[in-house]
């Protein structure tokens, strides 16, 4: 059984592992390559635990936008919509988990919707022991942005970034880092160049340059990613935001070789 080894959290963004302009369209070639890079890094980082998350891209975001699921039970279609969003999110999670298994990793689905209860979008009750034991027993959990049962409004949605931020507060493992894999090369400034490092002090000047996502997205895109990253940076957890389209960029970042992207950290 694994003890309290450092934990690395990696999110494979929906923008890079799906075609967000077309419904239910995974980019299987990219998924396979990124999984391969994680497999390769995991062999070198034997003293670390891995928790994988992924966005929904052209899967869960599409029905979530149609039924306005993030706002709860707002009309007669809302309950059906919640079921559709959950089913679609689960379908894509199985695609991602299946690829990890094909490449030899003991990946298991861990769905936040079955373990976290919210109230007006804020966490209310939660059970994380199963997730903790997956990690301690050498399994690799794979989670995703998800639709939650909400005590007050019926349902809501948390992005994978929000789930990660929550888990860093509640899991009994030291957090080594969080890596967000996107289709962009990092966070761009007003000059359209990638900003290599952002801190809570420099963010106010940069914020107006950060745009929204292309295609389907109901959870805030890069702006939400930065907001969650800054919360983590203030707690001393470094966040790397990078492109998954560049071969071996994820692998290099994980093993601390030269990588391209944006580091969110304390000054």
Image (cartoon, rainbow, N blue to C red):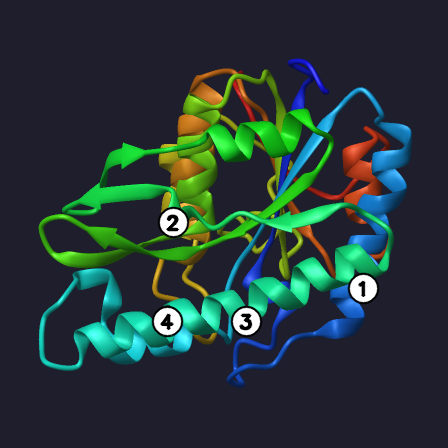
Q: Looking at the rendering, in which quadrant would you find the N terminus?
A: top right
- Point out the tag, 2 or 1, that comes first from the N-terminus: 1
* Label number found at residue 91: 3
- Point out the tag, 3 or 4, that comes first from the N-terminus: 4
The CA span between labels 3 and 4 is 10 Å
Helix, strand or loop at label 3? It is helix
The CA span between labels 3 and 2 is 15 Å
Q: Up-down: is 199 above or below 196?
A: above
Q: Up-down: is 232 above or below 5?
A: below
Q: Which residue is mark 4?
A: 85
Q: Which residue is mark 2?
A: 114
Q: In this rendering, would 77 be left or right of 148?
A: left
The CA span between labels 4 and 2 is 14 Å
The CA span between labels 2 and 1 is 27 Å
* Percent of width and height locating residue 104: 86, 51
Helix, strand or loop at label 2? It is helix
């Amino acid at each position: 059984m694994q003890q309290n080894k450092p934990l690395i959290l990696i999110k494979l963004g929906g923008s890079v592992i799906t075609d967000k302009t077309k419904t239910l369209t995974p980019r299987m070639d990219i998924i396979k390559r990124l999984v391969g890079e994680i497999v390769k890094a995991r062999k070198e980082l034997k003293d670390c635990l891995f928790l994988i998350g992924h966005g929904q891209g052209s899967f869960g975001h599409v029905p979530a936008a149609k039924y306005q699921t993030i706002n709860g039970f707002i009309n007669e279609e809302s309950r059906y919509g919640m079921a559709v969003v959950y089913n679609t999110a689960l379908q894509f999670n199985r695609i991602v988990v299946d690829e990890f298994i094909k490449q030899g990793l003991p990946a298991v689905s861990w769905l936040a919707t079955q373990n976290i209860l919210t109230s007006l979008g804020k966490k209310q009750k939660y059970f994380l022991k199963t997730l903790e034991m997956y990690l301690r027993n050498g399994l690799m959990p794979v989670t995703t942005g998800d639709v939650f049962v909400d005590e007050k409004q019926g349902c809501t949605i948390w992005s994978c970034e929000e789930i990660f931020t929550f888990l860093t507060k509640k899991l009994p493992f030291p957090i080594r880092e969080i890596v967000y894999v996107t289709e962009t090369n990092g966070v761009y400034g007003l000059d359209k160049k990638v900003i290599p490092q952002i801190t809570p002090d420099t963010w106010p000047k940069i914020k107006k340059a950060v745009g929204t996502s292309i295609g389907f997205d109901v959870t805030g895109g890069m702006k939400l990613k930065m907001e969650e990253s800054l919360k983590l940076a203030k707690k001393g957890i470094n966040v790397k935001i990078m492109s998954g389209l560049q071969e071996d960029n994820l692998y290099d970042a994980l093993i601390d070789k030269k990588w391209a992207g944006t580091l969110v950290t304390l000054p």
